[in-house]
Amino acid sequence: MSAPSAPSLPPALGSDRQDGSRWATAWRYALALVISLTAWFTTAATMADAQVDDTPIFVWFVIGDLALGLVSFLLVRWRARVPATVAAVTNLLTFVSASSAGPSTWMVGSLAARQRWRDLAWVAPLAVVAGVVQERFYPGDDDLPLWASVLIGALIVGIVIAIGNAMGSQRNLMASLRDRAETAEREQQARVARAQTAERTRIAREMHDVLAHRISLVAMHAGALSYRTDLTPEEQATAARTIEENAHRALTDLREVLGVLRDPTLAGGAPEAPQPQAADIGRLVDDERSSGMRVAFEDSTRGDVPDAAARTAYRIVQEALTNARKHAAGTSVTVRLTGSEEDGLDVSIRNAAPVGNRDTVLPESGLGLIGLQERVALAGGRLRHGTDASGGFVVAAWIPWHP
């Protein structure tokens, strides 16, 4: 015979995709079948040329060889569970079965694709020996020298291992790229979710800071109209005008907040209204006084307060006055601003302890002080709040002059 029965065609290599694709399995079986049929017909042609008339050998070749080949194909079904065992058994069957060449070659490539080098260390020599033994098992008149058969068999097995390793590396690379793509997609989704949560929190904070102040004024005066039956017509008209004015201001503030939160590209490239500045704190206190709240305001800052620090201070004062109206109605409130560029900006709002029982309690959102803490922290400052020794409530903050 001219060469070992193991063919030189590249095997299917067992590099099945983990997704269990039917096509991936089908073409591997088809290639293994081609290898087995090639080996079997090559051996049959060699025996015919040698005019072999040994009946037992001929019967075995027609029946036994093909039966063992069928068994080899059935064993391949368990290649994923016990690849080394299947590789060993199929190569042992190849000793006396040319039709087992396809599955045995497939399993050598499968071990290489899976990079199971310890198993290949003994399966690869077994495959070389199987080719040499099979060549001499069937009679022929052109047998190669033993050293040539071993060399050709080793070369074929080496090619199978090299191709299997390359295909396995390519498969692993594609799997790694898919994993990276899936991980990047999950991370992107997480970033989008965090951004959406942050944006919702920012919108909720802005809406609370702006609307809670106006709506609490409306609720307070509406409550006065409901419970005070002794008001004169003039007083009733004044309360109604206050409700109307603050309702209009609430709508205006809502429009300003939405203008600030809207994408500038949708609003001509700029917010619809400017953000609060230092002078607006005094106007905020005047509005509270005009609504009947007793507020004392002290501003001893030195220099022009930067807009960023003034905006944070404005929101602190606004929230503190709103809370004082809601939880300590009728008490006096003191607002103090002190600081300089060297010392930073100190904001302090204190209301006296509430006296008596209130007939109505305005609903609490639970966002006010939490929002203030976040806002001050973002500005690089500090905030503290709580009850003092006299029972009054104090909100105090320090804000850096230039955050």
Image (cartoon, grey):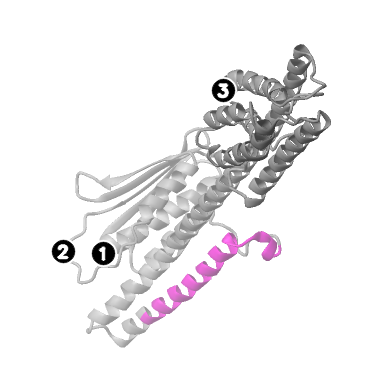
Circle 1: is it few (<14), some (14-19), or many (20+) Cα within 10 Å?
some
The reply to whether residue 324 is in sight is yes
* Residue marked by disc 3: 119
Direction from residue 143 to residue 329 in the image, left or right: left
Which one is in front, 51 or 93?
51
Q: Quadrant of residue 50?
A: top right
Q: Quarter of the image containing the N terminus?
A: top right
Q: Is residue 358 left or right of residue 155?
A: left
Q: Which residues are magenta?
A: 240-268
Q: Is residue 378 above or below residue 263?
A: above
Amino acid on which the number 1 mark rests in the picture: Gly
**Prevailing secondary structure of the magenta residues:** helix
Q: Is residue 266 magenta?
A: yes
Q: Earlier in the sequence, mark 2 or mark 1?
A: 1
Residue 146 percent location from the top left of the image: 75, 13
| Amino acid type, label 3 | Asp
Report which residue position mark 1 lands on. 330
Kind of residue at disc 2: Gly
Residue displayed at 41% across by 54% down: 317
Q: Nearer the viewer, residue 141 or 325?
A: 141
